[in-house]
Amino acid sequence: MNKKAFFIVMWGFATLLMISIFAGVFVIKHVNRDPIGDMQMTVFDTYNEGEKTLFYLDQSSKYAFKKVEPMLNCDKDSCEVSKAQVEKKFNEELNGYISDRTISELYGEYSLDEGAVPLNNYRLEFRSGKVFAKAIKDIKIVNSNVEYSVTPNLVIETDVDFNKIIWTDEGLGLFESPETEKKGLFE
């Protein structure tokens, strides 16, 4: 074999050797990585858990308000009702639906930290056929390295005629100040 043929054959072997080394390094470097899209799926799963929580709270608030409605039904032209007592009763009923047992059943493999869904968390405002429940604190959902915070404001439709209700002077609300009462919660 002459020197040119030997050089060409060696050049081919050297090229194959370099390609196999680079391929080996590439495979070793990327085998230990998380698959592409894992972080995006974690973000998506965390968002879905937040939506699941909001839906659960929305439905729970409707059931809780059904238990509060008898306090607001007036048989006469008008009646006096304490807004603070209504808020307190609503929060107590809602707390029953978001107890630790219920939350753990709701989440299964995902778990919320204790206190992630705050108790006694709502101020109420009553307007023509709707009750607006404004959250005081956000819900925080943590999944791996992703933290998602959501404010669970709720709207509950009702048949109660709020024009018949005279709110007593003690009834600024459990969590409200006179300034909040004048401005309104959603203005």
Image: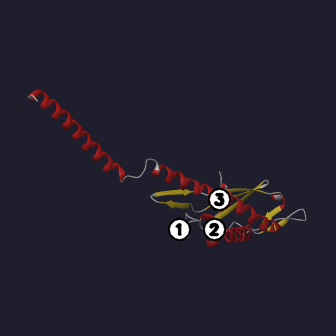
Circle 1 is placed at which residue position? 113
Three-letter code, disc 3: Lys
Nearer mark to the viewer, of 3 and 1:
1
Residue 136, by quadrant, is: bottom right
> Residue 147: in sight, yes or no?
yes
Specify few, some or many for label 3: CA neighbours under 10 Å numbering under 14, 14-19, or 20 or more. Answer: some
Disc 3 from disc 1: Cα separation: 22 Å
In the rendered structure, the answer to whether residue 94 lies left or right of residue 139 reads: right
Disc 2 and disc 3 in contact, CB within 8 angstroms = no
Q: To which residue does mark 2 refer?
A: 105
Query: How many discs mark residues in the rendered view?
Result: 3
Please, what is the three-letter code of the amino acid marked with disc 2? Answer: Glu
- At label 1, which amino acid type do we have? Asp
Element marked by disc 3: strand
Which badge, 2 or 3, comes first in the chain's sequence?
2
- Nearer-N-terminus badge (3/1): 1
What colour-coding does the image apply? secondary structure
Q: Position of residue 39 (x, y in %)?
A: 46, 51
Q: Quadrant of residue 19?
A: top left
Which structural element holds mark 2? helix
Circle 3 is placed at which residue position?
134
What residue is at 71 percent from the left and 70 percent from the top?
93
